[in-house]
Image: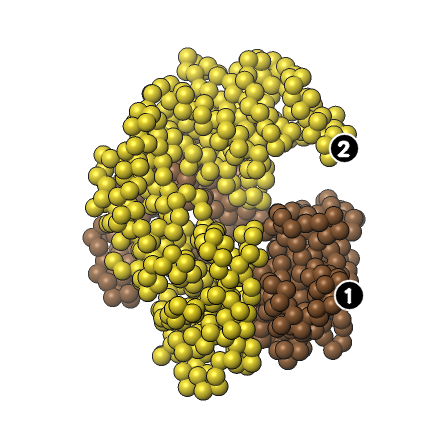
Chain colours: A yellow, B brown
């Protein structure tokens, strides 16, 4: 019965600060999602006695050890032989794995180096965990030390290979072996525009502590809300859907997506569906809005142009912002962004345009317009909206938050919900 | 004598996958720089018996334990009392720390909550490590268990507070207690345009293994080269400078900076110094070049405009790319980017302009122009340069690499070194 886990992360590149260990974070998240208690994460380098200590320590404290790294083809890769030595079994070669590796190398027209064969050796009695994307399969092996048994799950360190193995093999295995017939149903809402405390309070009013586990995670500038319900199959999903409906009913306009979806993906999908063409005019965000939208494949379906008009002469010459506006209201003003948006739409023939202008800092602030003053406008044949915000934070935060508000305005416009309510962070 | 270290990282937010533990990576890096052997990183949550286990395990394996987290004001913050219990000493309140906290709260016009006083309690005999940026000071305490002594160094988990404490207090302390009068001198070179293996080979030909420790770290799209020399004060720095001269002599054009400096900072500095105004025309990079340059304060000194001309009509209408070029050579062609760069320069009155157009994928490739085909041009009254590259990777890598090449072209132009040699990745 699997209740307690230890994560083991090995490799000199982590121990020398060369690589940030994001695997452990990912695995911790998966364990929490599946109701397993993570006791500790132990990280050590490719030194035989340290690896042996780490494995023995991990086994003693857990029902399952999930390890990443150390199963590559080089002499530094010691995980498999360390596990076999601790388990007191010999290594046996798996012909299916040899064949899989040979096919992988053949598919890129290369001869498999002899040392790769090592990756087809497994401790006797191990169950092989297939690795469709790489040469090194993983394995599962139960090991008993001093009367206590722990299940060892050995995965490669390359995140691109490890994650699908975790999702397709290890998570279902964990669920089958949790020693309960209950399942865990989970839903993630991506929100923008409410503060963490406002969101916390809103959800606390909707969901009682015994109905679901509620987790908020701020990854600036958005906050995700995770609901987890444990229960009998069928029943847990029904309960979750009921709670999800309550959340949608209360904060729907701030939920921009359900699941692992970014704001730029949502905006791209909405514009594509509604066949709307977009133009952007950026000043303080400096190209970030365009960059974010073009990170999503298919952005050429709706994005016509992004005019990053950093100098005032360009705002005037390219977008037609009036000399009068620049002289009296200034480049950071609602008047200016309204003219920028209108000019961008006119110059490109787009259906909608958004514009930003502000003071991202750290210099350039004045008493009237301190650092963090950002004006945003949206122009269409239906709406002309503008607003002045006062943001706080470093230059990159102000850029990122401004870009997020502009994207949220486009989303709200496409959905026909009030633009003016975006990012007021009312408590 | 401090030779072996263990890093201890505590906090439920790490154990539930809420936060990636970047502190441990930073600390690992600092330990390596200072010649200390990192035995293990142990991470655990805010559970008393797990914390006690983690501390006892860490002490047994090390001469120094560096811990982050668990010294906040809440009941979950258990580090200080766990350490005192293990050391067998009582907690004593430090009045200077109380006064410092009160001043901090007063400076933001708030009354200090009563529970913050906890952060002024330290195990008896501890040496306090000042925290200029936050309420919780750290401390150092030697603890002996079963005849073995380890120095415990307790720091806050907030990176912004922890890092200056590490740099200003802990690193000098480690250097004094390493049990050697040798020092470690270090230099970092930021390179772009050579492959990792080419760089490795070039440096191997210049520096013998006993002269310095050489570390390469690829953080796409650039590679940093770190030279570390251990020796007597004065002598180590002289040796390092001699080696640095050899590196500069051999690969100078690929070294865009020494120290912790980004490509966009270098470009910004060069354009500002030389009073050159820049315009950009982006297609496949979608605003990323502008975004990167405007991340650096002061970019309004040299950046006039960035025309993200995603649609062909905009390339023609705004930048004056000819219908003929778009029809025959296509938007992804050297002809097109040359016309884009020339148009951007003309429309903005800039001294230099760069342009990008390519196929970032995953769709849109053809046999003639597969995904990863990227054309780049630079236009000035001195040079007109263009080149077609074939990059490999995901959409975001192709965008990032293209933006890096364009920035490197500007750098090379400003320095008067050959543009054509950028990013050929010759082996």
Numbered disc 1: secondary structure: loop
**B29 vs B413, nearest the viewer:** B413
For the point 63% across and 14% down, the residue is A92
Residue A131: assigned label = none
For the point 66% across and 62% down, the residue is B356
Q: In this view, does A393 lie to the left or right of B187?
A: left
| Subunit bearing disc 1 | B
Residue that badge 2 annotates = A110
**A32 vs A268, nearest the viewer:** A268
**B304 vs B235, nearest the viewer:** B304
Q: Do the residues labelled 2 and 1 touch (CB within 8 Å)?
A: no
Label 2: few (<14), some (14–19) or many (≥20) C-alpha neighbours in 10 Å: few
Q: In this view, does A148 lie above or below B256?
A: above
Confirm whether residue B63 shows in the render.
no
Q: In this view, does B185 lie above or below A365?
A: above
Q: To which quarter of the image does residue B288 belong?
A: bottom right
Nearer the observer: mark 2 or 1; the answer is 2
Disc 2 to disc 1, C-alpha distance: 36 Å
Total numbered badges shown on the rendered structure: 2
Residue that badge 1 annotates = B418
Residue A366 at x, y = what percent? Answer: 39, 78
Residue A206 at x, y = what percent? Answer: 22, 44
| Subunit bearing disc 2 | A
Q: In this view, does A422 lie to the left or right of B356?
A: left
Residue A256 at x, y = what percent? Answer: 38, 51
For the point 37% across and 66% down, the residue is A391
Residue B104 at x, y = what percent? Answer: 30, 62
Label 1: few (<14), some (14–19) or many (≥20) C-alpha neighbours in 10 Å: few
For the point 52% across and 57% down, the residue is A293
């Amino acid at each position: 019965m699997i209740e307690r886990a230890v994560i083991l992360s090995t490799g000199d590149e982590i121990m020398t600060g060369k690589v940030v260990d994001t695997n452990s974070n990912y695995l911790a998240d998966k364990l929490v999602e599946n109701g397993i208690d993570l006791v500790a994460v132990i990280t050590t380098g490719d030194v035989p006695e340290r690896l042996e200590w780490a494995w023995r320590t991990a086994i003693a404290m857990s029902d399952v050890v999930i390890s990443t790294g150390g199963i590559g083809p080089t002499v530094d890769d010691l995980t498999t032989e360390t596990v076999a030595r601790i388990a007191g079994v010999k290594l046996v070669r798996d012909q299916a794995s040899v064949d899989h590796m040979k096919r992988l190398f053949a598919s890129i027209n290369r001869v498999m180096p002899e040392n790769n064969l090592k990756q087809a050796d497994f401790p006797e009695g191990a169950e092989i965990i297939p690795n469709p994307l790489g040469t090194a399969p993983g394995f599962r092996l139960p090991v008993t030390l001093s009367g206590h048994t722990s299940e060892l799950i050995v995965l490669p360190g390359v995140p691109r290979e490890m994650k699908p193995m975790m999702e397709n093999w290890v998570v279902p295995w964990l669920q089958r072996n949790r020693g309960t017939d209950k399942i865990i149903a989970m839903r993630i809402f991506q929100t923008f525009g409410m503060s963490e405390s406002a969101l916390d309070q809103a959800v606390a009013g909707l969901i009682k502590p015994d109905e679901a586990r509620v987790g908020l995670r701020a990854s600036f500038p958005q906050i995700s809300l995770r609901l987890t319900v444990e229960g009998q199959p069928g029943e847990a999903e029904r309960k979750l859907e009921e709670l999800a409906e309550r959340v949608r009913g209360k904060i729907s306009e701030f939920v921009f997506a359900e699941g692992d979806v970014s704001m730029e993906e949502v905006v791209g999908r909405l514009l594509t569906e509604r066949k709307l063409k977009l133009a952007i005019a950026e000043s303080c965000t400096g190209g970030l809005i365009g960059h974010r939208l073009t990170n999503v494949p298919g952005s050429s379906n709706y994005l016509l142009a992004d005019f990053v008009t950093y100098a005032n002469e360009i705002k005037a010459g390219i977008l037609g912002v009036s000399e009068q506006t620049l002289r009296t209201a200034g480049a950071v003003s609602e008047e200016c962004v309204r003219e920028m948006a209108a000019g961008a739409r006119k110059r490109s023939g787009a259906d909608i345009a958004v514009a930003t202008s502000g003071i991202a800092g750290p210099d350039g602030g004045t008493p009237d317009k301190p650092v963090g003053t950002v004006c945003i406008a949206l122009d269409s044949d239906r709406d002309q909206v503008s607003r002045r915000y006062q943001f706080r934070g470093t230059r990159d935060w102000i850029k990122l938050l401004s870009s997020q508000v502009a994207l949220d305005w486009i989303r709200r416009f496409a959905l026909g919900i009030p633009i003016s309510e975006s990012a007021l962070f009312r408590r």
